[in-house]
Amino acid sequence: MIKKILKLDWKSIGAVVFLLASGLIAIYSFSIGVETEDVNIFNKQLIFLLIGVGTFFFFSFFDYRTWMKYSNFLYLSSLFLLVAVLFFGQNIRGTSGWFNFGFLNFQPVELVKIFSVIFLAGYFVKKGNKKIGLKEFFQSFLIILPVLFLILKQPDFGSASVIIVIWLGMSLLAGVDKKYLFALFVIILVAFSLSWETVLKDYQKERVLTFLDPERDPLGSGYNVIQSMTAIGSGGITGKGIGKGSQSQLNFLPERHTDFVFASINEEFGMMGSFLVVGFYWILFYRFFETVKNSRDRFGQLVASGVFIMFFYQVVINVGMNIGIVPVTGISLPFLSYGGSFLIVSMISFGIVQNIWLKKRNMILPESE
């Protein structure tokens, strides 16, 4: 076992450890000198992290090839969880997406994301090594359509966008002709243009316009972005120090421990801290690329690629909405943002990639491991 632990990809693990520590420091700083509900989230996040570390090591040594056999079951489980949460889930901030277990609010859509990676990888592998044609591309869309529908019923547009990006990215890597993706992009663009006048309601149009110019509604839909950019700007080069960020400490910055944790880090640790965070994400993604390149089979390549796409998209969108270049979608930052189910599933996903790394093609490991 010790030999296996030593053979894990410690470069990517080191990057994740840094990101986890940065998230914990940011969450801890919110509670310094202030008796609010935020005091408890640091202790909760520590417990979530301990659970996450345990799941990480379990899935790091659990043969990823086993998931191929259960890809259909994971698909059905996704549908079951998404239907169940609509009927029995707790409504938080207008979204019926959580099961309440007392200490933990479990968000099943986080589990559905990694399930989607696995069952899409299974689907494409079962099609063999032939080029993915229009028929297979359309069938793969039909597979994720019920998942998307149920997620949008919550509604959770951010998670739905993650599923769509996973599907598109994995389809491309599986070998779908790029012309189909281009045609899909044109269709979406035309549909959006037509819906502007015929489908979108006034408040929906206002959200789009406010994204382009947050000052249109500084106390409403533009408030979050304005406060986030103010926090980032006030941090300067070196930041204000732990617990000294005015925007985050005085509650001007909304969702400071989830959606806007990056702005909080920038305010308290400055651009240097933010560059370090982005740098360690780059290391993580580069190691994911190495795992994909050295995977011993197509299923492993697609699963590792899917996890990479999922993490990369979430990082880009979260950082983008913190600096005001993409709309606020409620997508958290992997390994940094507060959240039990989000952190644990992120660690599970990372563990699966580690197992693919362990069984990479230049290592001789028994098939029965």
Image: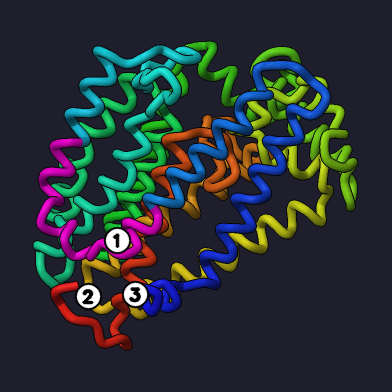
Residue under the point 74% across and 25% down:
253
Amino acid at circle 2:
Asp
The local crowd at label 2, few if under 14, some if 14 to 19, many if 20 or more residues have their Cα within 10 Å, is some
Q: In terms of image quadrants, where is residue 108?
A: top left
Which of the two residues, 37 or 329, is positioned nearer the viewer here? 37
State whether residue 323 appears in this view: no
Depth check, mark 3 against mark 2: the one in front is: 3
Percent x, y of residue 222: 69, 22
The residue that disc 3 covers is 358
- Residue type at mark 1 is Val
Whether 70 is among the magenta residues is: yes
Image quadrant where one finds the N terminus:
bottom left
Query: In the image, 364: left or right of 92?
Result: left
Which mark is in front, 3 or 1?
3
Q: Indicate which disc residue 297 carries.
A: 2
Q: Earlier in the sequence, mark 3 or mark 2?
A: 2
- The answer to whether 239 is drawn above or below residue 97 in the figure is below
Find disc 1 in the rendering and name its residue.
303
Q: Is residue 299 left or right of residue 266?
A: left
Say few, some or many: other residues with alpha carbon within 10 Å of mark 3 (under 14 / 14 to 19 / 20 or more): many
Please tell me whether mark 3 sits on a helix, a strand or a loop.
Answer: helix
Q: Position of residue 60 (x, y in %)?
A: 35, 62
Question: Residue 368's quadrant in the figure?
Answer: bottom left
The stretch in magenta equals: 56-77
